[in-house]
Image (cartoon, rainbow, N blue to C red):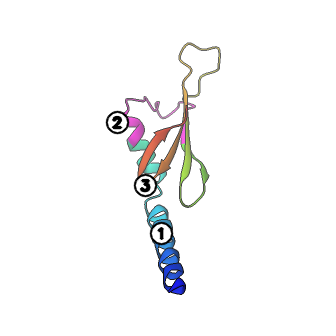
């Protein structure tokens, strides 16, 4: 009986991990997310940066920086975590 319970627990954990890995968002999804939030990504010659900072396979940390300096009034930066195909702000 205990073996059956352990087996079900292992299968359940494996299924959850598989779903997390499959739904880990990409940089393209992050770009779409930023544009829906109204973040200006800059022109072709701008120094803006956005993308995946860290990939942990079950979730990723994304960051955006508009290329301005800290003392600029237009300075904007943000960090988001991507999990289950969604993004959540860390800052």
Q: Give whichever of discs 1 and 2 has the lower sequence position.
A: 1
Label 2 neighbour load within 10 Å: few <14, some 14-19, many 20+: few
Mark closer to the chain start, 1 or 3 = 1
The residue that mark 2 highlights is 36
> Which marked residue is nearer to the observer: mark 3 or mark 2?
3
| Picture quarter with the C terminus | top right
In the rendered structure, which segment of residues is drawn in magenta? 33-50
Name the magenta segment's main secondary structure: loop
Dot 1 surroundings within 10 Å: few (below 14), some, or many (20 or more)? few
Q: Is residue 40 magenta?
A: yes
Q: Is residue 85 above or below residue 11?
A: above
SS of the residue under disc 1: helix
Residue at image position (46%, 54%) is 25
Q: Where residue 84 is drawn, which disc sits there? A: 3
Circles 1 and 3 in contact, beta carbons < 8 Å = no
Discs 1/2, front = 1
Q: Residue at x 47, y 61 (%)?
A: 20
Under circle 2, the secondary element is helix
- Residue under label 1, please give it: 18
Mark 3 touches mark 2? (CB < 8 Å): no
């Amino acid at each position: 009986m205990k073996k059956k319970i352990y087996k079900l627990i292992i299968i359940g954990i494996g299924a959850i991990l598989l779903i997390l890995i499959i739904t880990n968002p990409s940089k393209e999804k992050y770009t779409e997310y930023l544009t829906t939030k109204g973040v200006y990504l800059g022109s072709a010659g701008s120094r803006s940066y956005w993308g995946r900072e860290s990939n942990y396979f079950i979730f990723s940390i994304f960051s955006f920086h508009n290329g301005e300096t800290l003392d600029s009034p237009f300075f904007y930066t943000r960090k988001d975590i991507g999990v289950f195909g969604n993004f959540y702000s860390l800052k």
